[in-house]
């Protein structure tokens, strides 16, 4: 359903459970970044009316998740601060072709894969936190559906604008690339490390 080629390694879950602070802080930054990416696409591709309302709704939902995560940080007395981002998104997006319309297709599919990886990890965290941090478990279970929907939104938008078979083939290629960069040379725990 999520078009991911490789599952998250058990080591990542182990690291996440042992470093809540980095996990929650980076998660907050990821929600902010997801909103900003959707808004950037609205500005860059104003000629594609099909993208406007779905991406605006997605950006609003990501900002509501950002506010939710700010609340979680505050409750746990973790000051929101800058954090060196992981190399994951730039490495994934490096595979996007530079010329239009390929650039738009590849960007939509990279966004779909980022949402898919977030969704997969959110589900894993919801389960992993059940016995040790029930509040965090509930938080992650509550986020699962919307992140799965965001993945679907990006794939659906790609199918609306491009040939369905081309979307399928390119999504498979980019998914293999996503699996190959996951966890590579990451200095610290991040949501997508
Ligand atoms: Fe989100
Ligand atoms: Fe999302």
Image (tube, rainbow, N blue to C red):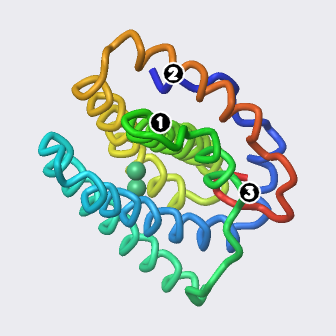
CA distance for labels 3 and 1: 33 Å
- For residue 95, what is the image quadrant? top right
CA distance for labels 1 and 2: 8 Å
Does 180 sit left or right of 71 as displayed?
A: right
Tell me if mark 3 has few (under 14), some (14-19) or many (20+) residues whose alpha carbon lies within 10 angstroms of its own.
some
- For residue 121, what is the image quadrant? top right
Which of these two is toward me, 154 or 116? Answer: 154
Q: Are marks 3 and 2 in contact (CB under 8 Å)?
A: no
Q: Secondary structure at mark 1?
A: helix
Residue 42 screen position, x and y as percent: 25, 57
Q: Which mark is residue 17?
A: 3
Q: Are marks 1 and 2 in contact (CB under 8 Å)?
A: yes
Q: Which mark is residue 170?
A: 2
Which of these two is toward me, 144 or 40? Answer: 40
Q: Under 8 Å from ligand 1: the CB of mark 3?
A: no
Answer with mark 1 or mark 2, whichever residue precedes in sequence.
Answer: 1
CA distance for labels 3 and 2: 34 Å
Q: Quadrant of the N terminus?
A: top left
Rendered-image quarter of ligand 1:
bottom left
Answer with mark 3 or mark 2, whichever residue precedes in sequence.
Answer: 3
Q: Which residue is farthest front?
A: 99
Does 132 sit left or right of 99 as displayed?
A: right
Residue 60 screen position, x and y as percent: 24, 63
User: From what the image shows, is residue 86 above or below residue 168?
Assistant: below
User: From what the image shows, is residue 150 above or below residue 162?
Assistant: below
Q: Which residue is mark 1?
A: 106
Q: Are marks 3 and 1 in contact (CB under 8 Å)?
A: no
User: From what the image shows, is residue 72 above or below residue 77?
Assistant: above
Residue 28 screen position, x and y as percent: 51, 70
């Amino acid at each position: 359903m999520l078009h991911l080629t490789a599952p998250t390694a058990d080591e990542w879950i182990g690291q996440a459970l042992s470093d809540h602070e980095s996990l929650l802080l980076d998660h907050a930054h990821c929600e902010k970044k997801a909103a900003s990416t959707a808004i950037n696409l609205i500005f860059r591709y104003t000629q594609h009316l099909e993208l406007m309302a779905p991406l605006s709704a997605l950006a609003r939902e990501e900002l509501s998740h950002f506010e939710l995560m700010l609340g979680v940080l505050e409750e746990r007395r973790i000051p929101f601060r800058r954090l060196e981002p992981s190399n994951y998104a730039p490495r994934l997006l490096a595979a996007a072709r530079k010329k239009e319309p390929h650039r738009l297709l590849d960007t939509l599919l990279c966004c779909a894969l980022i949402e898919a990886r977030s969704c997969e990890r959110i589900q894993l965290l919801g389960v992993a936190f059940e016995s040790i941090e029930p509040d965090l478990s509930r938080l992650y279970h509550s986020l699962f559906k919307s992140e799965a929907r965001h993945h679907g939104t990006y794939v659906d938008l790609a199918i609306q604008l491009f040939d369905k078979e081309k979307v399928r083939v390119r999504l498979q290629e980019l998914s293999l690339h996503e699996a190959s960069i996951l966890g590579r040379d990451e200095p610290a725990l991040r949501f997508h490390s």
